[in-house]
Amino acid sequence: MAIAYQSDKGPARSDNQDAVGAFYNRAGNPLVLVADGVASQEGSKKAAQMVVSTLGHAWEQVAYDEEEKVKAWLIHQADLANQAILLVGEHDQEISQMATTLVLAVSLSQKVLVANAGDSRAYRFRNRKAQLLTFDHTVKNELARQSGEQVDAALPEANSLTRYLGVNKELNLEWTTFVPEKDDWLYLTSDGMAKVLSIEAQLSIIQPGIRRPANNPIMGSVLDISERLSALVKAAIAKNVSDNVTVLIMTDMTGQRDSTGQQLTIQTDRPVKAEEVIDENGLKGRLD
């Protein structure tokens, strides 16, 4: 198994409000996350970072391996992360409306669980084709799903998010699962990439299953997928992407793993107790 990710603020933004991470639990199962702070709301960078940090470090403390237990745990932890964002906002009115999208995936021994709230996406690459695994939670998409008809993109607030973490007390993740095959790749991305490159264009740059020219690393290795992601981000920047861009790939989800998880990603921060996560904000409470 290999995981690599890259995040860039892009040429048009002063800072990066995306957050990304990969974490292994004590059973060796990886959790990957991409969060995209809602740019129109102050403090959303903090919201995205809090979600990735709280869920990731809490995941490192458990050893769940069964689908239903993992799903229930993630729902609970995402709700706690949402509550933490709301608590921070209550103590600082300037960031009381901060919010973030979230897309996550957990690779278990025989199944991959995917969940999202907002418009950050997950795709499965299989046989050099991309299958969208998530639903963009926007006004126009929700109306189209309810009516079964196309909705005018000029509708006021058509692209406004209907699901996210922050602002609202209720959090509703949307779930899907799939059984991975040997050569499947999982791809997570914030919505910035889609603003300048279609998924077909992204796929043509990533080229899963195809050895890239002058590409010497083992296909699907950390170095290999890191090079592909780097080329993808450079392509988005070359098109003057207006948003932050964050991308992540996981390969070999059917491979054997041991209790150490064989972590082959950028090193994360030290594991912390869940209740420490919001301590820097002067709050009291537990997230586990």
Image (tube, rainbow, N blue to C red):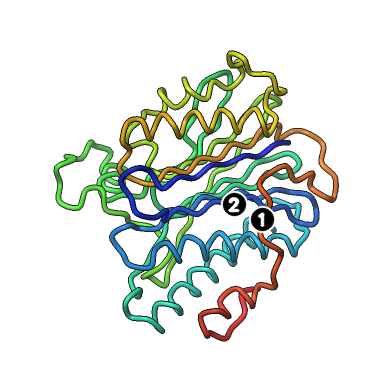
Given residues 29 and 231, the one toward you in this image is 231
Q: Is residue 49 left or right of residue 77?
A: left
**Residue 104 picture location, percent across and down:** 55, 50
Q: Is residue 151 left or right of residue 270?
A: left
Q: Is the residue under label 1 in contact with that under label 2 (CB below 8 Å)? A: yes
Query: Identity of the amino acid at label 2?
Result: Gly
Q: Nearer the viewer, mark 2 or mark 1?
A: 1
Q: Say above or below: 237 vs 155.
A: above
From the image, tell me which residue sits under label 2: 21
**Residue 60 picture location, percent across and down:** 72, 60
Query: On residue 59, which mark appears?
Result: none
N-terminal of the two: label 2 or label 1? 2
Given residues 25 and 158, the one toward you in this image is 25
Q: Is residue 129 left or right of residue 148?
A: right
| Residue that appears at 38% across and 45% down | 136
Q: CA distance from mark 2 to mark 1?
A: 7 Å
From the image, tell me which residue sits under label 1: 268
**Residue 87 picture location, percent across and down:** 45, 79
Circle 1 — which element? loop
Q: Say above or below: 143 vs 218.
A: below
Circle 2 — which element? strand
Number of disc labels:
2
| Residue that appears at 36% across and 49% down | 137
Q: Residue furthest top?
A: 213
Residue 63, quarter of picture: bottom right
Dot 2 alpha-carbon crowd within 10 angstroms: few under 14, some 14 to 19, many 20 or more: many
Q: Residue furthest right?
A: 258
| Residue that appears at 56% across and 59% down | 52
Classify the position of the N terminus by image quarter.
top right
| Residue that appears at 49% across and 38% down | 133
Query: Identity of the amino acid at label 1?
Result: Thr
**Residue 288 picture location, percent across and down:** 66, 73
